[in-house]
Image (tube, helix red, strand yellow):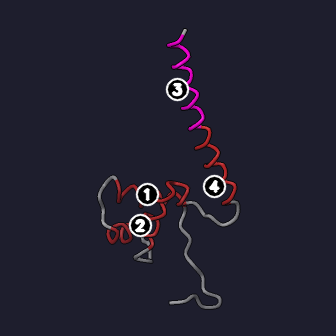
Amino acid sequence: MPARKGQKFKHYTEEMKKEAIRLHVEEGWTYRRITTHLDIHDQDRVRKWMARYKKQGEYGLFDQRGAKEQYVDENRQIARLKRENELLKKCLNIWMREV
């Protein structure tokens, strides 16, 4: 059903989203049980949160309007730095064996 002019949408906090994900992952609750327990009106909402969580981690649960590119760039930089650190550790081990 498409949105209607003037329609208000329910917003959920990041804490509620995290709790829904935790209940599903750690406690093994079904999506229906979670939506009933947390009073979430859209039956598929938790399923969508879970898909974003699996794809992007906790970042996927945040409101992604706005400065998303900054986070994506930072994550890429962090991944590049981790790879660089691993390479440097390997080089250090090789140099230490030669000494």
Q: Which residue is mark 2?
A: 38
Q: Is there CB contact under 8 Å for labels 2 and 1?
A: yes
Q: Nearer the viewer, mark 1 or mark 4?
A: 4
Q: Amino acid at mark 1?
A: Glu
Rendering quarter of residue 30: bottom left
The structure residue drawn at horizontal position 35% and vertical position 68%, both measured from the top left corner, is: 31
Mark number, residue 36: none
Residue ranking furthest to the top: 99
Instruction: Specify the label residue 19 is tagged with.
Output: 1
27 sits left or right of 77 in the view: left
Tell me if residue 62 comes above or below residue 78 in the rendering.
below
Which region shows up in magenta? Answer: 82-98
Q: CA distance from mark 2 to mark 3?
A: 49 Å
- Tell whether position 26 is magenta: no
Query: Can you tell which of label 2 and label 4 is closer to the viewer?
Result: 4
Mark 2 or 1: in front is 1
Q: Quadrant of the C terminus?
A: top right
Question: For the residue labelled by badge 2, is the local secondary structure a helix, a strand or a loop?
Answer: loop
Q: Are marks 2 and 3 in contact (CB under 8 Å)?
A: no
Query: What residue is rendered at 60% in x and 91% in y?
Result: 4
The amino acid type, in three-letter code, at marker 3 is Lys
Relative depth, front residue between 24 and 59: 59
Q: Work out whether 93 lies above or below 14.
A: above
Q: Amino acid at mark 2?
A: Leu
